[in-house]
Amino acid sequence: MIRQYWHFLCLTMVVAACTTAPSDLSHPMASPVAYARAEIRKSSLPAPTPTLPPIEGEITDEVLLNLMFPGSLVDFANGKALLRTENDISLDVARVLLNRAIRVNGAEKRFVIVERSRGECHACHAEISGILLTRTGTSWTVESLSPQLLTRGTFGHVFGADFIEIGSEYYGALIESGASYHGYYGSGIDVIALIGSDFEHVFNGDKSRGADRSVNRRECVAWRQGCLWGYDSTVSFMPGVNAEFYDLHIDQSGTNPGGYEFSTSQTYVMLNGRYVFQSR
């Protein structure tokens, strides 16, 4: 019994830490409003962006990582950088997740998302940061740096980052991250939005949950859960009630831990700088 409790506790801790979705596996649709508000931290004042010289030439991943972590880069190869740390004992790992050209009010800009981790172990999370560049003549200037927007992932990485349009000339990144442990798995999504010149963490939600415990039926039966269950979600952004920002729609379907099939849709609207639950 102690061993079973330890496995369940570890799963809850790992998935919650890596996705910030609820840790109660028996309630896949619990508290959508809480999802939208979880882990969203907004400072009262934006962090000042240091004055950096204009950048000439191609905007490569190595150039971007040097901008985000000045004086720290030790080596760069195959899209991955090794960074010097404060203790000089170990090296951090960093890479560019997104580097997209955008246009805002006629100005050419680059929307950049990077991740940095303390290593690539199972429990190593990634810190997600943002960079906004603006073209000035033939060069690029740094308009803003937004470090440590959120911390997610396992093995030093998130699952992925997709470039999204969340309104007319409003852009963002959809970050997916998760974890698996002893036959259970789970993932969550986060939305980082570019609002003005600042990157903001505007949404956190549940994407998928499940288990494949068929190899050890006694344990899942002891916890009164199905041995084989799971659900997943699709995410979309469409025009809605907000004139500037699209509504966020999440369609979720699958089987819950009790073995019952379900299907549901949720709508979130942008309100005061974050996506909040509106309806099902």
Image (cartoon, rainbow, N blue to C red):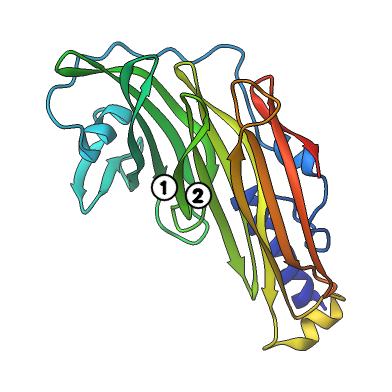
Q: Is residue 118 left or right of residue 272?
A: left
Looking at the picture, tell me which residue is in the foreground, 26 or 276.
276
N-terminal of the pair, mark 2 or mark 1, is 1
Mark 2, residue position: 125
Q: Is residue 242 left or right of residue 190?
A: right
Foreground mark, 2 or 1, reads 2
Callout 1: SS: loop
Q: Is residue 228 above or below residue 24?
A: below
Q: Estimate the x, y position of residue 16 in percent, counting from the top left.
A: 67, 52
* Residue drawn at 78 percent across, 39 percent down: 34
Looking at the rendering, in which quadrant would you find the C terminus? top right
Q: Quadrant for residue 205, please give it.
A: top right
Residue contact between numbered discs 2 and 1, judged by CB atoms under 8 Å: yes
Q: Is residue 108 above or below residue 17?
A: above
Quarter holding residue 63: top left
Q: The residue under label 2 is which amino acid type?
A: His
Location of mark 1 (residue): 118
Q: Residue at 61% of width from left, 37% of height from top?
A: 238
The residue that appears at 18% across and 21% down in the rendered structure is 55
- Write down the quadrant of residue 62 in the picture: top left
